[in-house]
Amino acid sequence: MSELLQRQHHVRAAAVVALGFFVALAAPARGQTARPAQPAAPSRVVAEVGGKKITVADVEDELAAARQRDASQNRLDAFTTAAKEGALNRIVGVKLLALGAADRKLDTDPDVRRRLDNVVDESLAVVLGAQLAAAIPMSPDALRKYYDDHLPLFSDPGRARARHIVVATRADADALLRQLQGGADFAKLASEHNVDSTRTAGGELGWISRGVMVPAFEQAVFSLKPGEVSPVVQTSFGFHIVQVEEVEAAKPRPFEQVSDLVKQRLLQDAIDNLQAQLRAKYPVHIDQSVLSTIDR
């Protein structure tokens, strides 16, 4: 759910920026007066389709969704003067199809009911998430305190520039390690023996960030100092010997660069805490035997 909330937050922000641009274009020239628009009440009925009412709030929701989609695609269709009618027409079309589905008793189909229940649950979750977000202190001081208290979350993870020798058997790797311990050139051995594409580059891997490689290989890389050579490391790709050439320690990213991420983390923490409370109230039972049968 947090990913959905984050995605909606970013798209909504882009839509607001775009809408502000059009408001500026539509502003009256100096010396002219503009008649202030009177906002319609959200519950006011715009149209009816077979007895189903369409309210101002319905049109506003559809228009906001269209603007979110357009902003994410760098389109402007939903910001034109005809956009309201387009939004209303889309709602009318959906209502007509829904009435047609009811005529065919599709609303009583168990699979349709299941999907409707899921849509309701997702909508409620999004609304609750929005309420949580509104209740979280987001002042500059609060954001800065969270940043300072959780600095590792907002730090570059550190990286190392390394090369490796990789062969198919431990016996080969052990033999090559003995040559290295005797003073053999690492890059030359890698060029002669590597079984992967780094052979042509003397085993050069470039810069490796934490969290990218398989655990055993990453542990070997970040346990070394520049110039050191690892013992033999086994992964699913073969048997490796690693040499680290340069290391950059983890370092915090400036607060100004991650302020939006700080907000997201605050919201995620609130959601995680609430979910933990709800799990205690509503136990979750997962049938692993059924889960294992799902292959798509």
Image: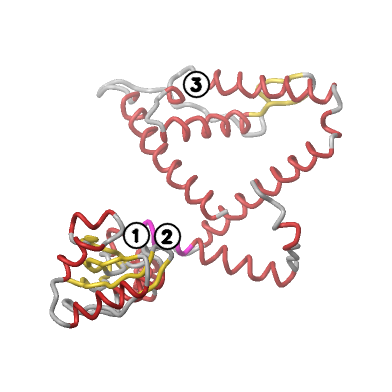
**Badge 3, how many Cα within 10 Å: few under 14, some, many 20+?**
some
Can you identify the residue that label 1 sits on? 259
Q: Is residue 100 left or right of residue 167?
A: right
**Badge 2, how many Cα within 10 Å: few under 14, some, many 20+?**
many
Q: Earlier in the sequence, mark 1 or mark 3?
A: 3
Can you identify the residue that label 3 sits on? 83
Q: CA distance from mark 1 to mark 2?
A: 6 Å
Dominant SS of magenta comes to helix
Q: Which amino acid type is marked by label 3?
A: Ala
Say which of 122 and 55 sits in front: 122
**Front position among marks 1 and 3:** 1
Of the numbered discs in the image, which one, if any, rests on residue 23? none
Residue 245 position, x and y percent, is: 17, 71
Q: Earlier in the sequence, mark 2 or mark 3?
A: 3
Of the numbered discs in the image, which one, if any, rests on residue 263? 2
**Badge 1, how many Cα within 10 Å: few under 14, some, many 20+?**
some
Residue 244, compared with residue 50, is above or below; it is below
Q: Which residues are magenta?
A: 259-266
Q: Is residue 46 left or right of residue 265?
A: right
* CB contact under 8 Å: marks 2 and 3: no
Q: Is residue 168 left or right of residue 82?
A: left
Residue 210 falls in which quadrant of the image?
bottom left
Residue 197, compared with residue 88, is above or below; it is below
* CB contact under 8 Å: marks 1 and 2: yes
Question: Magenta includes 22?
Answer: no
